[in-house]
């Protein structure tokens, strides 16, 4: 999770400003490259779900590990905008395969051992990888390395993490046979389920604008050299334990009340990051983002499973597609809005407004 998601998927964020400087990209182009990554992730997640229960799953995981490390390392060599689109598309697909198949293997093993509570530690890898990516980038930068060399250093770090992960994953039991599907009863998209799926897609758009551009936002402030790495480290540090925290909150408040609370806090963080006039506001916005996005991701899927009945795979596929669409649209639209308006206030306002619409869609679902 640290290598495939924390680095493979999110290391792009702290490197957006130096990539714009080195490659002459507009903010719209930077958004398009991020969108390509999220499109690859959505496609990869849907395809990976179809092989999650195959007996040769281990080979797919190994291939995904190699592909994710290779696409990160490729950043050290490519300059063409079109090549970056292609590489980040492939990187998104590789990270999705690592996440879906690796998570399936780990969660199944924990279930057999009767220790499902350790699943939160597995997902803490995302935040851990974000922190590692910042440390690698800053060490490389301090040594005078170029943006390309920083991508190379991230590729090496990713390969080391994947090697450690493979030592564990290769010892896990083979995938159990998939449970038989419900005979002929089709999955019914009830109104509450459609509202949940729509809210999950709005969350995908709402969080990804800030998650893509927050370091670029900090670059415009005074003392950016200090606050650029600090802001992204804060996101990672709070993301790491967030699922465990939000699981406990959900036990007290209920699933949907917790989702609405997390959506609201994230909207506040998006506005702070986009409209904050100083580094403290932007760092606080990053803290609210880091503390919520993984929790919403996990609890949203829990809610989907609860409403899926015998059609969990199909409903989770619908939610993944909705979430992926939101992630795909967010950076491209936000980049163009930022380029048009000269700042990230409008993109942040749109993202926060969509999160508020998500809160409205989640209201009253406890009773249905």
Image: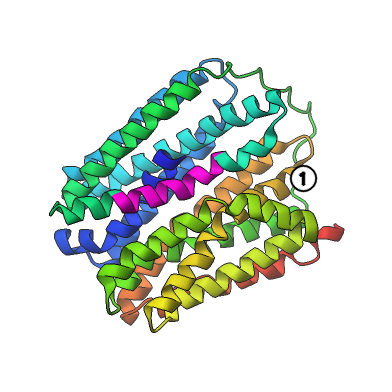
State the residue in front, 217 or 335.
Answer: 217
Q: Which residue is mark 1?
A: 306
Residue 318 in percent (x, y) is at 62, 45
Dominant SS type (magenta): helix
Task: Tell me what residue is drawn at x 51 percent, y 17 percent.
Answer: 171
- Examine the rendering and report whether any part of residue 135 can be seen: yes
State yes or no: residue 133 in magenta.
yes
- Examine the rendering and report whether any part of residue 60 can be seen: no
Q: Relative to 183, is 347 on the left or the right?
A: left
- The kind of secondary structure element at disc 1 is helix
Residue 255 in percent (x, y) is at 75, 56
Q: How many numbered discs?
A: 1
State the residue in front, 69 or 227.
Answer: 227
**Residue farthest to the right, as pictured:** 367
- Quarter of the image holding residue 26? bottom left
Q: Relative to 211, is 196 on the left or the right?
A: right
Q: Compared to 196, does 344 lie above or below?
A: below
Q: Which residues are magenta?
A: 122-135
């Amino acid at each position: 999770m640290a290598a495939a998601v924390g680095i493979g998927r999110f290391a792009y964020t702290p490197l957006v400003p130096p990539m714009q400087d080195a490659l002459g990209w507009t903010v719209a182009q930077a958004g398009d490259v991020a969108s390509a990554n999220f499109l690859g992730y959505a496609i990869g997640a849907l395809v990976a779900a179809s092989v999650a229960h195959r007996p040769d799953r281990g080979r797919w995981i190994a291939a995904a590990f190699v592909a994710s490390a290779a696409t990160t390392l490729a950043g050290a060599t490519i300059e063409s905008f079109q090549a970056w689109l292609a590489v980040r598309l492939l990187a998104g697909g590789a990270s999705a395969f690592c996440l879906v198949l690796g998570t399936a293997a780990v969660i199944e093993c924990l279930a057999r051992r009767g220790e499902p509570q350790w699943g939160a530690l597995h997902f803490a890898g995302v935040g851990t990888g974000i922190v590692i990516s910042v440390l690698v980038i800053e060490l490389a930068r301090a040594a005078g390395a170029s943006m390309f060399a920083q991508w190379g250093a991230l590729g090496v770090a990713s390969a080391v993490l994947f090697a450690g992960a493979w030592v564990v994953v290769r010892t896990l039991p083979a995938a159990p046979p998939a449970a038989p599907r419900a005979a002929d009863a089709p999955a019914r998209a009830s109104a509450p389920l459609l509202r949940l799926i729509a809210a999950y897609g709005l969350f995908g758009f709402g969080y990804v604008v800030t998650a893509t551009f927050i370091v670029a936002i900090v670059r415009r402030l005074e003392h950016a050299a200090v606050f650029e790495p600090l802001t992204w480290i804060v996101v990672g540090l709070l993301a790491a334990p967030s699922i465990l925290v939000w699981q406990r909150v959900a036990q007290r408040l209920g699933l949907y009340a917790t989702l609405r609370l997390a959506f609201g806090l994230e909207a506040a963080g998006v506005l702070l990051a986009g409209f904050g006039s100083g580094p403290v506001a932007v760092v606080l916005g990053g803290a609210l983002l880091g503390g919520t996005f993984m929790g919403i991701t996990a609890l949203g899927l829990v809610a989907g499973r609860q409403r899926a009945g015998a059609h969990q795979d199909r409903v989770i596929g619908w939610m993944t597609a909705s979430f992926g669409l939101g992630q795909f649209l967010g950076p491209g639209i936000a980049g163009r809005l930022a380029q048009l308006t000269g700042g990230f206030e409008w993109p942040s306002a749109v993202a926060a407004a969509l999160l508020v619409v998500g809160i409205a869609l989640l209201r009253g679902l406890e009773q249905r």
